[in-house]
Image (cartoon, rainbow, N blue to C red):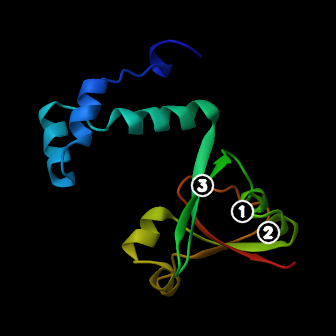
Amino acid sequence: MYGSTNTIIISADIENQINQLEASEKKNYMDIINIKDTGLNNLVKKGYSLLNLNTFFTSGPEESRAWTIKKGSLAPEAAGTIHTDFQKGFIRAEAVSYEDFINNKGWVDSKSNGKMRLEGKEYIVKDGDILNFRFNT
């Protein structure tokens, strides 16, 4: 569990330089110094991997939100991270992959283009799923 596969090296100096740049300049600078991602992003990814975590999203007209769950969580368990009543009364989840959601500019076109799926209680939530829970209280 230890060793180079679970080790990351972060330069505080480089992170500081990146954080002081405008968004448009960050990518150019990172290309010049030959790094693909910031140390903070690498730390988060490594932490999620070591802790066996995934992220799913909810998105509506008011807000979009990220939720953290254990890898392998079923849809009702994911619903329960939002509210225990969602888990207790779980009926189904409307699900769209992150890529399809972005490519179709949200729920409406994802549904009309056949990218939205209805998933039941045995559905294992995938990293990056956008979910809308149907439940009965």
Q: Nearer the viewer, residue 111 or 62?
A: 62
| Secondary structure under the numbered disc 3 in the rendered image | loop
Foreground: disc 3 or disc 1: 1
Which of the 4 image quadrants contains residue 99? bottom left
Q: Decide: few, some or many residues near mark 1? Use Cα within 10 Å; few <14, some 14-19, many ≥20.
A: some
Please state, as top left, top right, bottom left or bottom right, where the N terminus lies in the image. Answer: top right
Name the residue type under label 2: Phe
Q: Is residue 55 left or right of residue 15?
A: right
Q: Residue at x 21, y 53 (%)?
A: 23
Q: Decide: few, some or many residues near mark 3? Use Cα within 10 Å; few <14, some 14-19, many ≥20.
A: some
Q: Which residue is the site of mark 1?
A: 82
Considering only vertical position in the picture, is 104 above or below 58?
below
Q: CA distance from mark 3 to mark 1?
A: 16 Å
First in sequence, mark 3 or 1: give its number.
Answer: 1
Q: CA distance from mark 3 to mark 2?
A: 18 Å
Please state, as top left, top right, bottom left or bottom right, where the C terminus lies in the image. Answer: bottom right
Q: Decide: few, some or many residues near mark 2? Use Cα within 10 Å; few <14, some 14-19, many ≥20.
A: many
Marker disc for residue 126 = 3
Name the residue type under label 1: Ile
Tags 1 and 2 touching, CB below 8 Å:
yes
Q: Which residue is the site of mark 2?
A: 86
Name the residue type under label 3: Lys
Q: Is residue 41 left or right of residue 63?
A: left
Q: Residue at x 15, y 30 (%)?
A: 33
